[in-house]
Image (spheres, grey):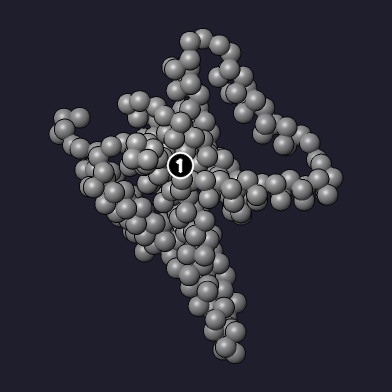
Amino acid sequence: DAYAWSGPARLASVATAVALALLLLGFFSPLGRGGLIGAGATAVVAAVWEAVAAVESDPARLGAVMAVFSVVLLGMLPRLALMASGLTALDDRRSGGASVSRHDVADALAATHRGLALATVVTAVSATAAGWLLTLAARPTVWTVLLPSLVAVVLLSRARAFPLVAEVVALFSAAAVLLVRLVMLWMDQASGGAGPVVVLGVAALLPLLVLSVEPPEHVRVRLRRTADLVESIGMVGLFPLAIGVFGVYGQLLDKF
C-alpha cells in the first residue's frame, strides 16, 4: 500500500465508490430504485463498520459486534426492501380503497427484488468479513470459534427465505468462506490429523446429497421445522457468544 491507508480509510473509499456506482446505476440505468436500495445498504453497513471501528480496535471484538449486526440486518432486509421500493405504500393505498396501477406494482416489485439482491450481497460480505475478523484473534478462544461457526449456520438457514438465486448464492458463499477459514484455523492449531479434511469433504458432499435426494413431503416439513428451530436457537445464541468474545464471563468469574 503506497499510501499506508488504515483499514477504516480503505473501507470508506471502497464503500463510497460502490455506493456512488450503484447510485448512478439507479438513476441512469434500468436498475432503477434497486440501485438506490443497494447504495443505501452499502452506505449504512459501511457507516456502522466505521462507527464500531472508531470505538473498538480489537479485530475479534469488532468482528463480534458486526457479525451480530449483519445477521440481524439480514433478517430485516426483505421488509426494508419492500418499504424502500414503495411496494408497502402501494399495498397500503390499495387497502385504503385507492386505485393502484399494475405498472406501478410491477415496477415496485422489480425494484424490491433488485434492491434485495444487492443489499443481501452487501450484508453477506459484511457477515463474512466480521466472521473472518473473529478468526484473527491473537489467542483463539471458544467464543471466537463458536461465533463465526454459528454465523455460518444462520447464513445457510436464512438462505431459505430469499427468493432469488443471486441472494442464495451470496449467502451460501459467505457461509462457505467462513467454513473454510475455520477449517484452516483448525489445521493451524491441530498437529496433524484428518479431522479438518473430513469436515471439508462432508461439507462438499452435503449440497450434492441435497440435490440428489428427494424426500417425501412429511420429511421435508420436519426438516423445515428443524431448520427453523436451529435458526432461532442460532439467532439467540449469537448474543451470549458475542458477549463472551469481550471476556465478560471471565471477568464475572474473577469477581465472584
The answer to which quarter of the image holds residue 24 is bottom left
Count of residue discs:
1
Is 102 or 148 nearer to us in this picture? 148
Vertical position of residue 189 compared to residue 98: above or below: above
Whether residue 247 is visible: no
Left or right of residue 140: residue 193:
right
Give the residue drawn at x 52%, y 31%: 179
Q: Residue 4 at what x, y percent from top left? A: 16, 33
The answer to which quarter of the image holds residue 205 is top right
Is 158 or 95 nearer to us in this picture? 158
Left or right of residue 68: residue 8:
left
Q: Which amino acid type is marked by label 1?
A: Leu
Residue occupying the far bottom of the picture: 97
Vertical position of residue 119 compared to residue 183: above or below: below
Residue occupying the far top of the picture: 192
Give the residue drawn at x 56%, y 40%: 153
Q: Residue 98 at what x, y percent from top left? A: 56, 89
Q: The N terminus is located in which quarter? A: top left
The answer to which quarter of the image holds residue 134 is top left
Give the residue drawn at x 77%, y 51%: 221
Q: Residue 41 at what x, y percent from top left? A: 39, 57
Give the residue drawn at x 46%, y 31%: 142
Is 248 or 202 nearer to us in this picture? 248
Left or right of residue 109: residue 244:
left
Left or right of residue 181: residue 48:
left
Q: The C terminus is located in which quarter? A: top left
Q: Secondary structure at mark 1?
A: helix
